[in-house]
Image (cartoon, rainbow, N blue to C red):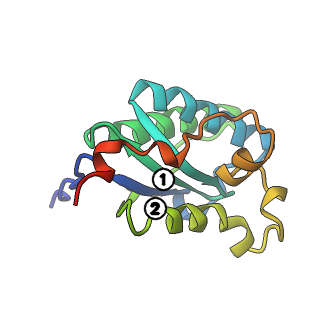
């Protein structure tokens, strides 16, 4: 039986989670995180996606995205994860699936849940007891927002498309 297509709606933000196959690490070295960030940077321009929060954990990724068109969400994530998987398999001389199944997505109510979702995503390393200070973990939007990070993939959440704020 085939799986049901995803239902994405336009003019909405999404909390996206993608996890390593069998919860295995997808980032082994510091450079792996940087490579994934580079793929996100390229894909956000290619697919016209804004990113309001992110966190790269050793075995999964959180993104809070705002696509111009909901049709680009799957293409954006497919492009990023496919290119990263090819890089990973080449560097570590492996093959097969790197990512576990389909990405998870949650529609975010901009008025009620946007800031909560940003905080949740950015606090992931603290909740996982990897660090006690968020600035000690540099693969998050928190680090980019409050330090001199060179990632530059983050869009300011205050730039949320104005037509959404005026809807009732």
Q: Position of residue 25 (x, y in %)?
A: 66, 56
- Left or right: where 161 falls relative to 51: left
Dot 2 or dot 1: first in sequence order is 1
Q: Position of residue 122 (x, y in %)?
A: 64, 61
Extreme residue in the front direction: 166
Extreme residue in the left direction: 1
Residue at 55 percent across and 35 percent down: it is 40
Q: Position of residue 62 (x, y in %)?
A: 54, 56
Give the CA separation, mark 2 to mark 1. Answer: 9 Å
Assign a secondary structure to mark 1: strand
Of the 4 image quadrants, the one containing the C terminus is bottom left
Q: Disc 1 marks which residue?
A: 64
Of the 4 image quadrants, the one containing the N terminus is bottom left
Which mark is in front, 2 or 1?
2
Circle count: 2
Residue at 62 percent across and 31 percent down: it is 38
Relative depth, front residue between 72 and 145: 145
Asked if residue 97 can be seen in this view, the reply is: no
Assign a secondary structure to mark 2: helix
Asked if residue 109 can be seen in this view, the reply is: yes
Q: Are marks 2 and 1 in contact (CB under 8 Å)?
A: yes
Q: Disc 2 marks which residue?
A: 114
- Left or right: where 7 falls relative to 54: left
Relative depth, front residue between 31 and 49: 49
- Left or right: where 111 falls relative to 133: left
Taking 154 as reference, is 55 above or below it? below
């Amino acid at each position: 039986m085939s799986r049901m297509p995803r239902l994405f709606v336009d003019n909405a933000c999404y909390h996206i989670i993608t996890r390593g196959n069998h919860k295995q690490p997808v980032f082994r070295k510091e450079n792996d995180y940087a490579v994934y960030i580079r793929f996100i940077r390229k894909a956000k321009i290619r697919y016209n996606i804004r990113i309001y929060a992110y966190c790269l954990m050793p075995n999964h990724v959180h993104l809070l995205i705002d696509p111009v068109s909901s049709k680009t969400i799957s293409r954006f994530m497919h492009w990023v994860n496919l290119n990263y998987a090819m890089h990973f398999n080449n560097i570590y001389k492996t093959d097969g699936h790197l990512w576990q199944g389909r990405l998870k997505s949650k529609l975010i109510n901009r008025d009620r849940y946007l800031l909560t979702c940003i905080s949740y995503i950015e606090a992931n390393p603290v909740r996982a007891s990897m660090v006690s200070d968020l600035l000690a973990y540099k693969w998050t939007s928190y680090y980019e927002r409050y330090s001199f990070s060179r990632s530059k993939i983050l869009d300011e959440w205050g730039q949320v498309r104005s037509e959404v704020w005026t809807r009732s």
